[in-house]
Amino acid sequence: MRELTPQLVYSLKHYSKEAFTKDLISGIIVAIIALPLSIALALASGVSPEQGLYTAIVAGFLISALGGSKVQIAGPTAAFATIVAGIVSRNGMEGLAVATILAGIMLILMGVLRMGSMIKFIPYTITTGFTAGIAVTILIGQLKDFFGLTFTHSPVETMEKVEEVVHTFHSVNLAAMGVGCLALAILIVWPMVFKKIPASLIAVVVTAGAVRLFRLPVNTIGDLYTISSALPQFALPAVSYDVVAAVLPDACTIAVLAAIESLLSAVVADEMIGSRHNSNMELVAQGVGNAASALFGGIPATGAIARTAANIKNGGRSPVAGMIHAVVLLLVLVLLMPYAALIPMPCIAAILFQVAYNMSGWRTVIKVVNHSPKSDVAVLAVTFLLTVIFDLVVAIAVGLSLACLLFMKRMADVSDVKEWEYVEDTEDEQGRLKPVPPHVMVYEFTGPLFFGAADKIPHIERNTGCHVLILRMRAVPAMDITALNSLRRLWHECQDKGIRVLFSHVNDQPMSVFRKSGMYDLVEEGSFVPNIDAALERAAELESQKV
């Protein structure tokens, strides 16, 4: 069970007062960074501000306590914003809670079944494409609040929001836009001057003060939401077959996205501290954290790369820092939450603009486009467009399908079946070709033999004058049942024409397919030989037996 032991257990074995001091300082700083982000991401997700803090508190504490990473900080992230908003609009908070709990159960099962390494099977182009797509959807979703627009209705889909922004742009509120621009300026300039205090916190304080001091006609959180400083309350959602059926696709999306983002964040953290995380334990912790977050009124959570990096840079080196960050946010919730009502909505939009910019990875996108094959660029572009136009479920499904098809085509392209060139047919003066008796044909198989390459296996449709066919398979690492059926067809064609088939140098995986299919027992004894020399000797023996 070592694989499913939380990192906290190992970290506490040699824990010291000095380590606790570093974790305490880092935990407090990360909490200050997480405070405005948690509120902003909750609003972007279509839920109340305190639910973002519930998520950071409950999921953040449990994922740090149970996780497989020393420094991972978990909480609400931008990747979930559009997904959560869609679930809430379609199925309400009950549906969101059920979807998040189901996603938590899926994540726990993924960890228990040792599926942590499965993250490597998600192509880089797909993660890059949907991350950039999510960034664009977040930006579009915040245009209303940044410009203070008055919508005629409440659109849900991204393209509907674009259409509504265009139709209502004449209602722009210059005061709101000014506050948003002020917040953006602070977010950009402040880190160049003061790095210790988070720019987002300064932007919140300055813009809230400006709106209140000058009585600007700008919506604040308090104008649109009822702020609560109550502690998270345990509530079991009503579960029914209809609700589960409705939210199951969303639950799968949450689980996959939480797994991808948390493990990517853990990998980045490993590189920064020279350590190695336990991916399976991390998935279990993500599952427990998400299920608990839903039961206490929160939204989906995962590892947050920016907050994790801030934890590392400020000295955090054990899960205790993440647990302290959650406790500090709990104190803020109880003591300071009413003041969140003063935060202007354009400031929240500006913070999310910066979040969208940071997660867009536009430099990475340009690098992929400039230096990758056109097929990979196509996968990235399709995933990006489908994320923006439709949703992440469609984008990942189509992107993965397209990536798999392209991969199969590439594998089929490198697979080849070619008849040998024979000494008597060439001017081989240097003896590079192996002499083959005139009654023998040799075919060289290269690359994996699967359904995409099965049509390359030849037919024997005419009398060749040969009595033995050698199929050299040393360069075939794998074979599937479709290719085996084509080989079976070839064997039957040879049988009809009195040609003996020899299989040379069959590797382990193809040999297991031969055995399981029964074809190993079907062919004559001695038809499988270890190498080409043995195959040619066997062919000579067969010819001598005929004579």
Image (tube, rainbow, N blue to C red):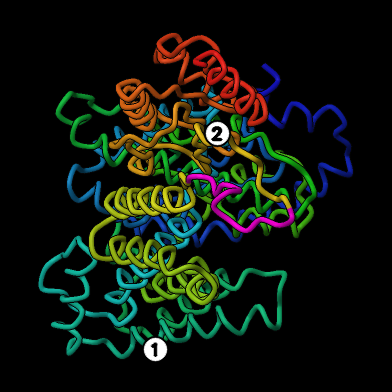
In the rendered structure, the answer to whether residue 317 lies left or right of residue 50 reads right
Nearer-the-camera pick, 522 or 68: 522
Residue at 47% x, 46% y: name it: 418
Q: Position of residue 457 (x, y in %)?
A: 38, 39
Amino acid type at image mark 2: Met
The segment highlighted magenta reads: 419-430
Q: What element carries label 2?
A: strand
Q: Where is residue 253 in the image (x, y as percent from the top left)?
A: 35, 43
**Numbered circle sitting on residue 473:** 2
Q: Where is residue 24 in the image (x, y as percent from the top left)?
A: 75, 47
Total marks drawn?
2
Q: Residue 186, located in which quarter of the rendered image?
A: bottom right
Extreme residue in the left direction: 152
Residue at 48% x, 45% y: name it: 419
Residue picked out by circle 1: 178
Residue 505 drawn above or below residue 231: above
Residue at 27% x, 80% y: name it: 148
Q: Are marks 1 and 2 in contact (CB under 8 Å)?
A: no
